[in-house]
Image (cartoon, grey):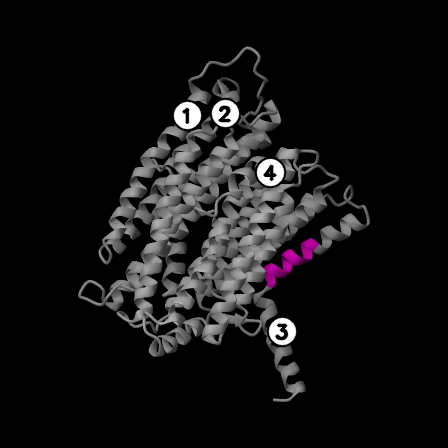
Amino acid sequence: MNFSEIITKLTADTLDSLPLFSPELSIVAAIVALLLVRLFDADKRFPGSVVAIIGTVLALGLAALQFKDLRDGTAESAPMFTGLLLYDPFTVYFRIFLLLFLLFVEWLTIISGIPDQEDAPDFYVLLLGSTLGMMLMASANHLLMIFLAVEMTSVPSYAMVGFLKGRRTSSEAALKYVVYGAGAAGVMLYGISLLAGLLGTAQLSSAGHLPSIAQALVEFGKHHSGFDPSVRTLALGILMVLVGVAFKLSLFPFHFWCPDAFEGAAAEVAGFLSVASKGAAFALLVRFCLALVGETTTAGSPLSELYMNVGVGLGIIAAVTATFGNLAAYTQSNIKRLLAYSTIAHAGYMLMAVSAMMIVLNAPSNEAATGAARVLSAQNCILGLLYYLAVYFFMNLGAFAIVALIRNQIYSEEIADYAGLIRQSPPLAVGMLVCMFSLIGMPPFGGFMGKFMVFYSVVEAARFHPVMWAILAAGLANTVLSLFYYLRVLKFMFLAPLPEEARPVDVKLFSDAGGYVAVVSAMVLLLGLLVDPISYTVTNNVARWLF
């Protein structure tokens, strides 16, 4: 193939990929428009928030049309840009998830007033740029594309954490975030180099269901035993890549940045990082794990045993992460630090579903582990993860939104200063109650169904590996432990007397802020009550496609 043929093929492939990439292109167009607004000092005529919302709504509409086409069968899964990215229902689902969440965050920033009009174009450029990186994480199909997407997500996040001017805690938090992020990125890149060097490919899959890395791994396993140094190097490479993902998920022991970053950042930014980065990182983790396992791994082979151990290791990390997050939250007096440790704990719960998936896909063959049984159990694991993320979207964003709205009234984020809030602003107090009960996992709120689905997937995996029973016990025990520190916040709000020197909190139900809280709280409740039509018409279809 000569040079002109290569250029012609690349041009044709790019032109075919652009329509599939249209939601991301809409976000890019919005970023360029915001930069032009800043360049020509036109933020008074074209507010940054309006430009950002228009771009987000357009991208969300395009993603929704793509999902409809895939569901109706008028469009098919396909690689984009010579296979660097994948277009499939899983990608489009996370596009919708991230764009809808971005829209809610933008709505919140307009209500809360952060950022101000002068800084709005800069802030929304960072917000949209980080979201664009997260969308690439969900569709990445190449090891180097994974690294670029993670960095594109992280760099704007560093700036957003330190966006509050003149605050030492904000600058310190951003610096810690940058240092930890740089270290994790270096480890991840070295792991990618090990995998690509050993396997001779960096492509996750050559098409929707043809895993390139999995095929290379099978050939690798045929020539190397379990005690071969090459297998150990392979395990090290996988571990290093997982370190980079663990940093984005703030899993123990890569969680150090999370509490400081959340405390130093504005509550709006902390809410964005707590949900969006988790969703994108879990999408990437699922893709990476499935690329390793593929459809060609033979049960009982050295690599199958390696993947089983990876699954068990992920389960142990999940249990330790949930336990650490819940225990550390007990001593917190700042509400954002408490919610930061809560975020760490919930990342542990969701990781249990990925651990269960790895175990059921690599369990030794027997009557209980037929091919059909594996696929069904794996589908249940992904279903639990996707539904938990959908609920986590609203309950965690709702909690951070209420923190931001209270901060604007009392200029404090200390839990003790929430005393007697029910007497001043019932909508905020009741909204926090709904979000906290859902974070605990109490029925009939959405958090209960999310945890139920995840724990059910752990039970499925426990049939194949007894360690998962201990993981399940840890998850249930942590759910009980979390009850106390969540209720401590509600105790101040509902039972503590209103101090005489307390600043007034005036947020009515039929105000902009009250309406926002009502919408988010209603979604948390609906996701608990309407689990059947929502889960089995959307998330279950996406989970089923993966297998």
Question: Is residue 531 or residue 498 the one in the foreground?
Answer: 498
Report helix, strand or loop for mark 4: loop
The spot of residue 281 in percent (x, y) is 48, 54
**How far is mark 2 from mark 3, CA to CA?**
54 Å
Task: For mark 3, give the secondary structure.
Answer: helix
Dot 1 amino acid type: Arg
Q: Which residue is mark 1?
A: 488
Q: Residue at x 51, y 29 (%)?
A: 334
The kind of residue on which mark 3 rests is Leu
Q: Earlier in the sequence, mark 2 or mark 1?
A: 2
Q: Which mark is residue 202?
A: none
Query: In the rendered structure, which disc, 3 or 4, sits on the residue that comes first in sequence?
Result: 3
Q: Reading the chain from its start, which is encountered first: label 4 or label 2? A: 4
Up/down of 188 relative to 419, above or below: below
The answer to whether mark 2 and mark 1 are in CB contact below 8 A is yes
Disc 3/disc 4 C-alpha distance (Å) = 40 Å
Residue 15, disc: 3
In the structure shown, which secondary structural element does the residue marked by tag 2 occupy? helix
Name the residue at the bottom extreme. Answer: 1
The answer to whether mark 4 and mark 1 are in CB contact below 8 A is no
